[in-house]
C-alpha cells in the first residue's frame, strides 16, 4: 500500500471511530436540564 | 621536478576519485500527507446544541509519534519511510480529525478539543488510547485501541445502557468492533 492510500484509509478509520463514538454520545441519558 | 610531477599526478587522481564518489542521481523529494475529516457531512445545518462534548488528546504509542509514515511489517518490525512524512504530528492530527468528525456527526452537541475552559459544563469527555494505527505491509490499515466516554469530572467511564456489562469502551479494528467489558470498580 502506498502512503497516499494509507493516509486515506487512516482517515476513513478515524471517521468510523467517530461514528461509533457519536452513536454512544447520542445514547447518553438526557441531562437533568434536558429531562425537565 | 620529478617529485613535483608525481605529487601533481596524485592530486589529480584523488580529485577524480572524489568526483567519482559523487552520485549524479537526484535525491528523492519527501512527500507530505495529512489526515482528513469527513467533509461532506460538515455542510449539514447545525441544530441548537444541547450538550458540550470534550475530546481529550488521543494517546498514540511512541513509535508512531514521529514525522515519518510508519508501516507495520510484523509484530516486532516497523518500516519507516524517510520520504513519506506527516505534515503535522500524528497525535494532534488524530485528535483534530476525530473532533472535526464528531462535530460533523453530533449536530445536537458542541464539540471542543482539549484544553477547554475550566468552567465548561461538559456532558462527557472522549478518551482514545491507540495501540496500533498504521498501514500494514499486507495492504490493510489497522486501528487498534480503546475508547471511552468519561464522566465530565472524573476517570469513570459512563455506562451507556442498562446492562452492566455494556459500557462505552471497546476494542476496534478492521474486522469490526468488539465490546470490551469494563473492569470491576
Image (cartoon, rainbow, N blue to C red):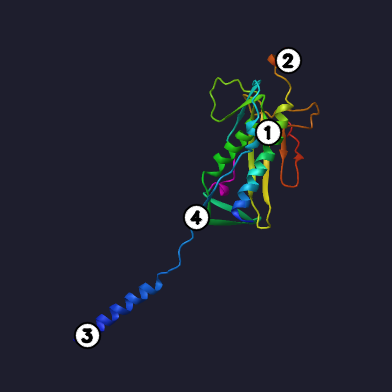
Judging from the image, mark 4 belongs to the subunit labelled B
Judging from the image, mark 1 belongs to the subunit labelled B
Relative to B163, A5 lies left or right? left
Assess whether residue B64 is covered by the magenta stretch. yes
Q: Can you tell which quarter of the image residue B154 is in?
A: top right
- The residue at which mark 2 appears reads as A35
User: Local crowd at mark 4 within 10 Å, few (<14), some, or many (≥20)?
Assistant: few
Q: Are marks 3 and 1 in contact (CB under 8 Å)?
A: no
Residue B166: x, y in percent?
A: 78, 32
Distance from the alpha carbon under mark 3 to that under mark 4: 49 Å
- The residue at which mark 1 appears reads as B148
From the image, which quarter does the C terminus of chain B lie in? top right
Which numbered marker is on residue B30?
4
At 70% from the left and 16% from the top, the residue drawn is A34
Judging from the image, mark 3 belongs to the subunit labelled B
Residue B132 visible? The answer is no
Bounds of the magenta segment? B59-65
Q: Are marks 3 and 4 in contact (CB under 8 Å)?
A: no
Assess whether residue B88 is covered by the magenta stretch. no
- The residue at which mark 3 appears reads as B3
User: Local crowd at mark 1 within 10 Å, few (<14), some, or many (≥20)?
Assistant: many
Distance from the alpha carbon under mark 3 to that under mark 1: 81 Å
At 79% from the left and 29% from the top, the residue drawn is B164
Amino acid at each position: 500500500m502506498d502512503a497516499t492510500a494509507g493516509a486515506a484509509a487512516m482517515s476513513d478509520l478515524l471517521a468510523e471511530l467517530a461514528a461509533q463514538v457519536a452513536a454512544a454520545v447520542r445514547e447518553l441519558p438526557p441531562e437533568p436540564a434536558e429531562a425537565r | 621536478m620529478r617529485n613535483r610531477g608525481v605529487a601533481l599526478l596524485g592530486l589529480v587522481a584523488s580529485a577524480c576519485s572524489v568526483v567519482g564518489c559523487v552520485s549524479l542521481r537526484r535525491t528523492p523529494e519527501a512527500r507530505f500527507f495529512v489526515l482528513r475529516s469527513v467533509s461532506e457531512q460538515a455542510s449539514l445545518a447545525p441544530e441548537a446544541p444541547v450538550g458540550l462534548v470534550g475530546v481529550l488528546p488521543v494517546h498514540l504509542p511512541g513509535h508512531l509519534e514521529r514525522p515519518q509514515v510508519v508501516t507495520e511489517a510484523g509484530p516486532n518490525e516497523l518500516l519507516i519511510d524517510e520520504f513519506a512524512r506527516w505534515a503535522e504530528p500524528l497525535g494532534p492530527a488524530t485528535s483534530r480529525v476525530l473532533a472535526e468528525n464528531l462535530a460533523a456527526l453530533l449536530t445536537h452537541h458542541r464539540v471542543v478539543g482539549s484544553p477547554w475552559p475550566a468552567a465548561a459544563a461538559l456532558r462527557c469527555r472522549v478518551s482514545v488510547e491507540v495501540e496500533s494505527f498504521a498501514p500494514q505491509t499486507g495492504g490493510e490499515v489497522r486501528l487498534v485501541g480503546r475508547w471511552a466516554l468519561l464522566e465530565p469530572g472524573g476517570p469513570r467511564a459512563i455506562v451507556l445502557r442498562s446492562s452492566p456489562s455494556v459500557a462505552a469502551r471497546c476494542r476496534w479494528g478492521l474486522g469490526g468492533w468488539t465490546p470490551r467489558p469494563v473492569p470491576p470498580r
